[in-house]
Amino acid sequence: MSSGKIGITLTRHLFEEQRLHPAATGELTGILNQIALAAKVVSREVNKAGLAEILGLTGEENVQGEQVRKLDVFANDVFMAAFDHCGHFCIMASEEVEGPILIPEQFAKGHYCIAFDPLDGSSNIDVNVSIGTIFAIHKKITVNSWDGTTADLLQSGDSLVAAGYVIYGSSTMLVMSTGNGVHGFTLDPSVGEFLESHPDIRIPPRGKTYSVNEGNYPYWSEGVRKYVNHVKQADPATGRPYSARYIGSMVADVHRTLLKGGLFMYPADSKDPDKPNGKLRLLYECNPMAYLVEHAGGAASTGRGRIMAIAPTELHQRAPFFAGSPENVRELEEFVARYDG
Ligand code: AHM
Ligand code: MG
């Protein structure tokens, strides 16, 4: 039998944070509870991903590809259904949906907007590797209407009021910040609650791990190539060569970087002329991760300046992304400044 201790639930943590801010309306608490609810539903389905065929969850043809697509769409539907009626949002954006998502007429509108990636790293689903959900929350800035507009979504990371991710890994964790530290909660599936497991995450000032898809090496700028050459050179005095760790799921790679330190990178590359800024999306991948990394004492950069200072112009725009231990990020920026002009 266990000791009978319950631990700090996500709900209790949010309630205590809310009490520290007498002006708080409880809306953010409501939002995070909806995210936790949707995350539990997605977690349940992700855990069954390998059984899809046995349980008859997919169609007959193209089982692998179809299953991956289905779980993406399923996750999007679950988060939309958790958000659209709750009365907290005026507009939403999802990686799965091209335009802004309006709140249906019949539901109340709220003072916040959310951009989210319902299932990031989805190419990893069918190989049983960690995937995740990422979310970014802003306050509504437009006036005169209860409905939000694209302008509400195109705010910089510096205006975020909360952000986080859920990682569906060997356990399911929710890591989030509302501006008062970064806190991690692990889902106890036996009671269906997220319990505080990683309070006040602080990233080490320097790490000895670099994380990047090195197959893109020939397409990077000279500065990024020189930096990666540098971290691979032997220099026992400074702990080089660094270890390479790359999962190809941003949530998992950033999660490890937050806890252990080091540098996660998705640089701009010249491979695809349509994607001159790399692969990752500013609003629902780079900004929320930058918010968490900075609130944990780290840094997040385009290579030339802070990610969160970018003024967005498009819902699905991309940005080069370097995030992690502050000393590693500064060093990368020095290489970019020296070799890329
Ligand atoms: P997705 O949104 O289509 O899943 O793509 C984003 C993912 C990130 O999780 C990850 O960092 C990156 O793609 C990996 O890309 P690559 O396969 O080019 O290394
Ligand atoms: Mg994604």
Image: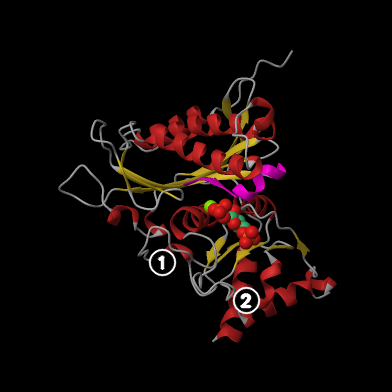
Q: Which residue position holds label 2?
A: 220
Q: Which residue position holds label 1?
A: 310
Give left or right: position of 289 versus 265.
Answer: left
Between 27 and 8, the one lying in front of the other is 27
Residue at the location (40% across, 32% down)?
81
Q: Is residue 1 magenta?
A: no
Q: Amino acid at mark 1?
A: Ile
Q: Amino acid at mark 2?
A: Trp
Residue at the location (59% across, 79% down)?
336
Residue at the location (57% across, 84% down)?
340
The reply to whether residue 10 is in sight is yes
Q: Tell me where the magenta segment starts and ends, as one range.
A: 117-128
Q: In this rendering, which labeled residue sits more in front, label 2 or label 1?
A: 2
The reply to whether residue 296 is in sight is no
Between 146 and 296, the one lying in front of the other is 146
Which quadrant would residue 47 be assigned to in this image?
A: top right
Q: Residues within 10 Å of mark 1 (few under 14, many from 20)?
A: some
Rounded to the nearest angstrom, the CA distance separating label 2 from label 1 is: 21 Å
